[in-house]
Image: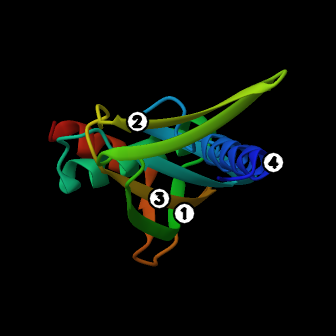
Amino acid sequence: MINMRKLVVIAGLSALLLTACEAAPNPYPNGPGFYENDIEATRIHITYLVPNGASRTRADDDILLKAADDTLARGHSWFRVTSRSADIDQRNSGTTVSLGTGTTSFGRNSSVGLGLGTSFNLGGGPRQVLGLEILMGDGAKPSDPGAYDAADVARTIRARR
């Protein structure tokens, strides 16, 4: 027979591991949309959790339009893309199975419990995540291919919608 102290230790460690898994912060607490981090006064990183069903072309336009709108809203005339990223957020995909144990003791009696659970994805599965880091500026737009006139980008993308 398994020693009760060992069961208590196993149950405690299981609970600690499950708590650690649940405590991981959600990088997208508001669901699909834009998340921005200011790096410097004229440099920001934009992350876009793309809604399910959106095409990659549409998503690329959306994040460029966001960069243009942010640039204009902050009083600048152009922006340069300094880095791009594309990833897949897998957190809401698939079925999960969990196993839990528990023990209790009262007087001369004790009990052991075992539980098995499953969950199904209701979040729509994996999503595209796009990232764009931009540097904003004023005056004449730099001549490199990663630089954009913010007003022109906003006008062009909105015209094709």
Decide which of tag 4 and tag 2 comes sooner along the chain.
Answer: 4
In the displayed image of the protein, which residue is found farthest to the bottom? Answer: 144
Name the element at disc 1. Answer: loop
Q: Residue at x 28, y 49 (%)?
A: 59
Position above or below: 116 against 63:
above
**In the foreground, 82 or 109:** 109
Answer yes or no: do the residues labelled 4 and 1 have beta carbons within 8 Å? no
In front: label 4 or label 1: 4
Q: How many marks?
A: 4
Name the element at disc 3. Answer: strand
The residue that mark 2 highlights is 117
- Rendered location of residue 154, percent (x, y): 35, 42
Q: CA distance from mark 3 to mark 1?
A: 26 Å
In front: label 2 or label 3: 2
**In the foreground, 6 or 64:** 6
Decide which of tag 3 and tag 4 comes sooner along the chain.
Answer: 4
**In the foreground, 21 or 40:** 21
Decide which of tag 1 and tag 2 comes sooner along the chain.
Answer: 2
The residue that mark 3 highlights is 131
Q: Residue at x 35, y 37 (%)?
A: 118
Answer yes or no: do the residues labelled 3 and 4 have beta carbons within 8 Å? no
The residue that mark 1 highlights is 140
Answer yes or no: do the residues labelled 3 and 1 have beta carbons within 8 Å? no
Decide which of tag 4 and tag 1 comes sooner along the chain.
Answer: 4
- Rendered location of residue 141, percent (x, y): 51, 64
Q: Residue at x 52, y 55 (%)?
A: 78
Decide which of tag 3 and tag 1 comes sooner along the chain.
Answer: 3
Quadrant in the rendering for residue 146: bottom left
Q: Which mark is residue 5?
A: 4
Quadrant in the rendering for residue 134: bottom right
Name the element at disc 4. Answer: helix
